[in-house]
């Protein structure tokens, strides 16, 4: 039987309960990172793949952080598409803030599934897994190769997940990558902002709290320094014209997906003071204050620009020392690439939405493929409650993402 969009959509709809049930059980399989133990969730994926008789292997450079890699050849020469999703999720914090059974319930309430990882990113990873299942079933009508990568360690930058796989398994690189991180339905992401993390430590002799004449306060110096660090946000990006045009067109969708101000934030250097630790006691002049700084770089701003501004600011603070703890540049691929066009066309077909090409505010594993000059695109559910309590995804949105990924992967691998 010849397969087409309509027959694929009919298959997906027949499996609606199976897809939602898999997704709920996936959320119930706890995988917070830290600590990063994903074995329960990997076992859930493995049972499904085994029951469906789908080819896969477990790649576990660290025992408690295994990765699932599946791959098949269609039998006819063609392109190689990689589906990527992560298994680990944010930790929970205070479970008492959660409704509908708690953070690991996978509860279905008023048309939405609740739980930690619901949108970041077990919905998108579920879409990848079921795309692999449907296309394997119809592989005789495809060209090329499809690879599934369900990875651990994404929340801690991927050393034992996608970074390890890309360094050690050539089969996971491919010609193009599709990922289901929570992008929101109104945008397809072709890039993401860079990340520059540093720790600044201010040290002074310190003294008794009544003897302020004996030592400057490390916390007072740190407070002035924090204010001055805002100057990095004045750096203006010089992005390629194609990226600038794409982001201008995407602005209304970004406002819908990310909230008011989201569109402007894409093209701005942002500064977040993640934590401040200083002082020992109310009646002591602090001798040390530690500041953790998170700077995000848009396309068109590089590492040297940030370092230059930081050096200028820190020249006024001899008490401060700096440690750079993480850096990666902004990444992007062609906003008008083939898979982008396929994704947008299928979303228009499935809904009344025309998702516009844009850049992500946060980091994803898609950057790791782009760093190797492999186009990587992201389309996933809205980020409802992401990183907070009552994280959830509407079932209709989950099914929409599954349909979009299945049809788009089919189109990419069935074209000449």
Image (tube, rainbow, N blue to C red):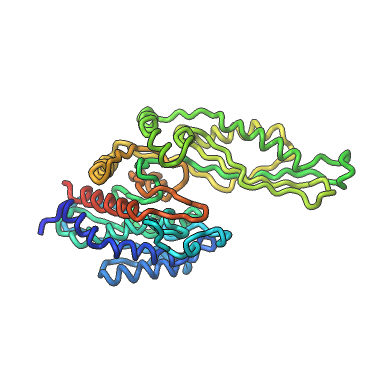
243 left or right, relative to 160:
left
Residue at left offset 49%, top offset 66% = 37
- Residue 218, percent from left and from top: 76, 42
Identify the image quadrant of the N terminus.
bottom left
- Residue 297, percent from left and from top: 50, 37
Residue at left offset 47%, top offset 69% = 63
Residue at left offset 18%, top offset 53% = 143
249 or 15: which is nearer to us? Answer: 15
Does residue 384 appear anywhere in the picture? yes
330 left or right, relative to 310:
left
- Residue 367, percent from left and from top: 41, 46
45 or 142: which is nearer to us? Answer: 45
- Residue 313, percent from left and from top: 66, 32
Residue placed farthest to the front in the image? 110
Q: Quadrant of residue 322?
A: top right
Q: Quadrant of residue 247?
A: top left
365 or 391: which is nearer to us? Answer: 391
Does residue 61 appear anywhere in the picture? no
Count of marks, rendered view: 0
Residue at left offset 18%, top offset 51% = 5
């Amino acid at each position: 039987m010849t397969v087409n969009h309509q027959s694929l959509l009919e298959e997906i709809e027949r499996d609606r309960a199976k897809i939602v049930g898999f997704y709920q059980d996936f959320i119930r399989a706890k995988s917070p990172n830290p600590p990063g133990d994903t074995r329960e969730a990997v076992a859930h994926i493995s049972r499904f793949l085994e029951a469906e008789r789908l080819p896969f292997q477990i790649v576990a450079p660290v025992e408690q952080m295994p990765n699932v890699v599946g791959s098949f050849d269609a039998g006819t020469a063609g392109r190689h598409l990689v589906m990527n999703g992560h298994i680990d999720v944010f930790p929970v914090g205070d479970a008492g803030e959660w409704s509908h059974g708690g953070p690991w319930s996978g509860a279905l309430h008023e048309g939405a599934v609740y739980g930690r990882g619901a949108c970041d990113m077990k919905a998108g990873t579920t879409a990848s897994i079921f795309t692999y299942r449907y296309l394997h079933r119809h592989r005789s009508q495809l060209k090329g190769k499809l690879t599934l990568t369900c990875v651990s360690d994404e929340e801690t930058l991927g050393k034992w997940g996608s970074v390890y796989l890309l360094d050690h398994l050539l089969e996971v690189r491919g010609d193009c990558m599709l990922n289901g991180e929570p992008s929101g339905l109104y945008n397809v992401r072709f890039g993401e902002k860079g990340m520059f993390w540093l720790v600044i430590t201010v040290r002074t002799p310190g003294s008794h709290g009544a003897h302020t004449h004996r030592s400057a306060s490390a916390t007072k110096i740190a407070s002035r320094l924090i204010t001055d660090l805002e100057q990095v946000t004045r750096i203006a990006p010089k992005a390629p014209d194609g990226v600038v045009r794409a982001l201008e067109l995407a602005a209304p969708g970004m406002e819908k997906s990310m909230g008011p101000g989201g569109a402007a934030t894409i093209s701005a250097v942002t500064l977040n003071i993640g934590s401040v630790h200083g002082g020992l006691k109310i009646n002591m002049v602090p001798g040390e204050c530690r500041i953790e700084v998170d700077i995000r770089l848009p396309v068109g701003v590089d590492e040297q620009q940030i370092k230059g501004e930081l050096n200028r600011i820190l020249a006024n603070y001899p008490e401060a020392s700096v440690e750079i703890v993480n850096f990666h540049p902004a990444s992007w691929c062609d906003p008008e690439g083939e898979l982008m066009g396929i994704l947008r066309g299928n979303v228009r077909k499935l809904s009344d939405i025309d998702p516009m090409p844009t850049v992500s505010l946060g980091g994803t594993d898609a950057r790791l493929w782009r760093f190797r000059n492999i186009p990587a695109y992201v389309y996933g559910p809205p980020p409802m409650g992401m990183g907070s309590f009552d994280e959830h995804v509407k079932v209709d949105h989950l099914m929409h993402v599954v349909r979009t990924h299945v049809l788009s992967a089919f189109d990419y691998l069935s074209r000449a």
